[in-house]
Amino acid sequence: MDSLPTLDDVYRKFGEASEAAQLLETELGTLLFGEQAIAEDLLGGDGKRATEIMMAINRQTLGTLIKNAKANSQSIEQIATLLDLALRERNRLSHSFYRQHNFRRNSGDGRALMMQDLETIHDVILEAYKQLMLLHGTDLDALAQEPFTLTTAHVRII
């Protein structure tokens, strides 16, 4: 029989799910920034305007980022439903997870239920992030299978 999760296990998994949400948010922001920078021909150009765009994107919520990505990127249509589900799960994680589970944190069986819920939340958000990355040519699952070696391609020399 597996041992029941500790409160530290719950907190750690909550953090992992939150990290996945931030990765998704960052990648959506990067997508929107890149598209706007190309549209305004800023590559190699106006750094001030690029900073303004980035600051405006950084103020957007995940919901707004998803809405804007859907409006500005045709490739997003393929994963729009998954992004909407990830947003719902992230909002539930951030705004009501502990309220929903309430006193479950005080028992092993309750923490096990919390962990199952966190696994589901994490899986949905992470899948949305992976699919977004895949749309733009990065297969995270394939990269995870490759052995890591440090080469000059991975090192930025200043």
Image (spheres, rainbow, N blue to C red):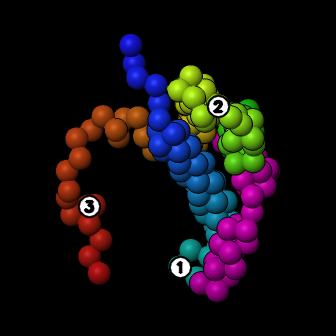
At x 72% / y 53%, what residue is drawn?
62
Which numbered mark, 1 or 3, is in the foreground of this view? Answer: 3
At x 70% / y 79%, what residue is drawn?
52
Which numbered mark, 3 or 2, is in the foreground of this view? Answer: 2
* Neighbourhood count class around disc 1 (C-alpha, 10 Å): few under 14, some 14–19, many 20 upward: few
Location of mark 2 (residue):
104
Residue kind at label 2, given as amino acid type? Arg
Q: Position of residue 105 (x, y in %)?
A: 61, 35
Looking at the image, residue 51 lies above or below residue 136: below
Q: Position of residue 24 (x, y in %)?
A: 59, 49
In this rendering, would 158 be left or right of 151? Answer: right
Q: Which mark is residue 44?
A: 1
How far is disc 3 from disc 2 in space, using C-alphas? 48 Å
At x 59% / y 57%, what residue is drawn?
26
Q: Which mark is residue 36?
A: none
In this rendering, would 28 be left or right of 85? Answer: left
Q: Earlier in the sequence, mark 3 or mark 2?
A: 2
Asked if residue 115 can be seen in this view, the reply is: yes
Per the rendered image, the range of residues in magenta is 47-76
Q: Quadrant of residue 50?
A: bottom right
